Amino acid sequence: MSWHVSVYVTLKPSVLDPQGATVQRALNQMGYQAVQGVRMGKFTELEFDGQLAESDVKKQANEICDKLLANPNIESYRFTVEKK
Amino acid sequence: MKFAVTVFPGSNCDHDCEYVIRDVMGQPVEMIWHKETDLKSPDCVVVPGGFSYGDYLRTGAIARFSPVMKSVADFAAKGGLVIGICNGFQILCEAGLLPGVLIRNKSLQFICENVYIKVEQAGTPFTSACQPGQVLKIPIAHGEGNYFIDPEGLKKLKGNGQVVARYCDEKGNVTSEANPNGSLDNIAGVCNPKRNVFGLMPHPDRSGEDALGSHDGQFIWKSIISSMAAAK
């Protein structure tokens, strides 16, 4: 058994996302007129040693996001933790 | 004056920097592999352009954790001159040595062309050989050169005179048409509050000789060399 952490990094609402805007235009052209917004982000899966306490896993995941996976200037993050 | 050029896996302007410093400007230069921690007592550190670590995750995000960057941060903290060009600018932002971040170009395209930049601050060690408002013709070559900072940060930058260079037209007009990548406020280069760390997206390393289309990059190198000589 190990801890499975799913990390979602997304652009802050104040940051323009030209990539998302381009994907939205493509979707609209494909006929999906109802799509009114697209924001692109990053998804990362981390596997932690199952011996760790859940609180330690969360603490380390927060540090990892703050230090490396997200840039606080432009991005925010959230994650889920489950044992698999 | 002695320069040190850091070399990361994926750096590709390290030799452009070495060439312009040694062969064009006639100064000694050491190449420092990213796993080294000894900068070999330079007067100025150059973090060159390229695609360090393949631009994985975010540009510069992984390079900032290379061992050499700790030494670069210590060197900067002691007042040493550090210039980051293109990917080097991105690395210095990720390392927190410069404010803001470089994000994807507004057009989503990689842009490789000559642009014009206006020297907004001629009082830094990196621009002291320029006239205030001087227009330099220097090429850019990047996909992520779109400078971004939050409104509060921008206010601080402007108040402290940290916006060193802005994209402009040939005559020095700072317009949205002259902004190649969507950078906030046409920002092409910024410095830290102490003015000893400077980041620039355009390449003074690729514009040191007329054979390359412009020698205006020499103004940056001349500024650094004369500033260091004056400090000694």
Image (spheres, grey):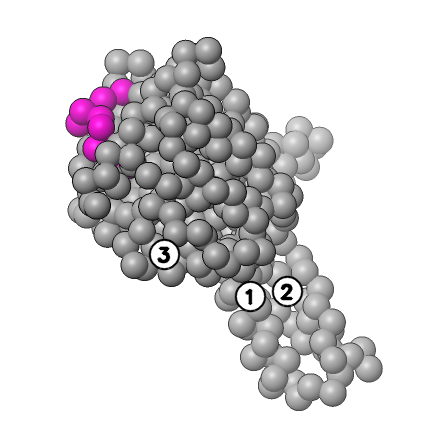
Chain identity of mark 1: A
Whether the magenta-drawn stretch holds residue B134 is answered as yes
What residue is shown with label 1? A65
| Three-letter code, disc 3 | Phe
CA–CA distance between discs 2 and 3? 35 Å
Q: Is residue A10 left or right of residue B74?
A: right
| Three-letter code, disc 2 | Val
Whether the magenta-drawn stretch holds residue B22 is answered as no
Q: Earlier in the sequence, mark 2 or mark 1?
A: 2
Q: Is residue B123 left or right of residue B12?
A: left
Callout 2: few (<14), some (14-19), or many (20+) C-alpha neighbours within 10 Å? many
Q: Secondary structure at mark 2?
A: strand
Q: Residue at x 46, y 61 (%)?
A: B70
Callout 1: few (<14), some (14-19), or many (20+) C-alpha neighbours within 10 Å? some
CA–CA distance between discs 1 and 3? 27 Å
**Magenta stretch secondary structure, dominant:** loop
Q: Which mark is residue A7?
A: 2
| In the foreground, A66 or B190 | B190
Q: Secondary structure at mark 1?
A: helix
Asked if the residues shown at circle 2 and circle 1 are in contact, with their CB atoms under 8 angstroms apart, the answer is yes
Q: Secondary structure at mark 3?
A: helix
| Three-letter code, disc 1 | Cys
Looking at the picture, how far across and down is residue A64, in whole percent?
57, 68
The quarter in which the C terminus of chain A is drawn is bottom right
What residue is shown with label 3? B75
